[in-house]
Amino acid sequence: MDIVLEARDLSFRLDGREIFQGLNFRLRRGEIYVLLGASGSGKSVFLKLLSGLLPPEKGKVEIEGIDLAAASKEALETIWVKMGFVFQDAALISNMSIFDNIALPLRYHTHLEESEVQAQVSEKMDLCEVDRKYDRSIPAQLSLGMRKRAALGRALVLEPELLFLDEPTTGLGAEADSLIARILKSFQERERASILMATSEWLSAISIADRVGFLDHGRIVAEGTAQEMLAKLEKMQRSGSPLA
């Protein structure tokens, strides 16, 4: 089993409240893992811990066998250029055009000629169906759905090997939800990328998942294939009992 990301015995507190204690997690290379959980269950914190955006109080996170807490700046740079992240609120830079937001990773992490940057950004905008009339618009001028598609384009522009997504479809309609799911599945199959998606809207996400976990009160209380978890979710909905 080829593991791209592993967390061992993670503990973390936020504002004095314990979020995780002794949490373990593995992400296999080339899989889509969907983390389900209600609002407030800790999904966003979990992604930030696993991507190195937050340091754990205890435990360690390793990506490609490299301990993020102990890694050199050069090693971290090597890891970060292989990663993409879509934040819950899209987190586009507010005073930067949509086109320049998507181009930012290329301009920061590569030495491509501007013509190649333009070509790759255009490709990702087309892939994510970001209307080209918004090239020079700032994020505040776009709908939530268009901002999230632009954020996905930015996350994919470096063709990352490891992709984190925090509620990428929340607040969107079914059509946009399905579009993002199709884009992610196609990208995973083409690049053999490893994808970790946290969401509370599970229907389309679970349809593309290789494995699914359910986060509750700081623990992954159930984990399995999409088919196994669908059966558990249906049983839970019928009985009104907790997922376990």
Image (cartoon, rainbow, N blue to C red):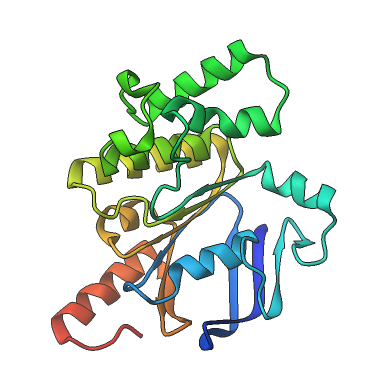
Q: Residue shown at 37%/75% (left/top)?
A: 40
Q: Position of residue 165 (x, y in %)?
A: 45, 53
Tell me: 20 left or right of 90.
Answer: right
Question: Could you tell me if residue 95 is visible in this image?
Answer: yes
Where's the C terminus, which quadrant? bottom left
Task: Answer above or below: position of 177 versus 117.
Answer: below
Q: Residue shown at 36%/26% (left/top)?
A: 137
Res. 108 image quadrant: top right
Q: Nearer the viewer, residue 2 or 87?
A: 87
Q: Residue shown at 50%/23% (left/top)?
A: 121
Q: Nearer the viewer, residue 39 or 222?
A: 39
Q: Position of residue 191 (x, y in %)?
A: 56, 36
Question: Could you tell me if residue 158 is visible in this image?
Answer: no
Q: Residue furthest top?
A: 115
Task: Answer above or below: position of 40 versus 84.
Answer: below
| Total tally of numbered discs in the picture | 0
Where's the N terminus, which quadrant? bottom right
Q: Residue shown at 28%/68% (left/top)?
A: 230
Tell me: 136 left or right of 202.
Answer: right
Q: Position of residue 80 (x, y in %)?
A: 68, 47
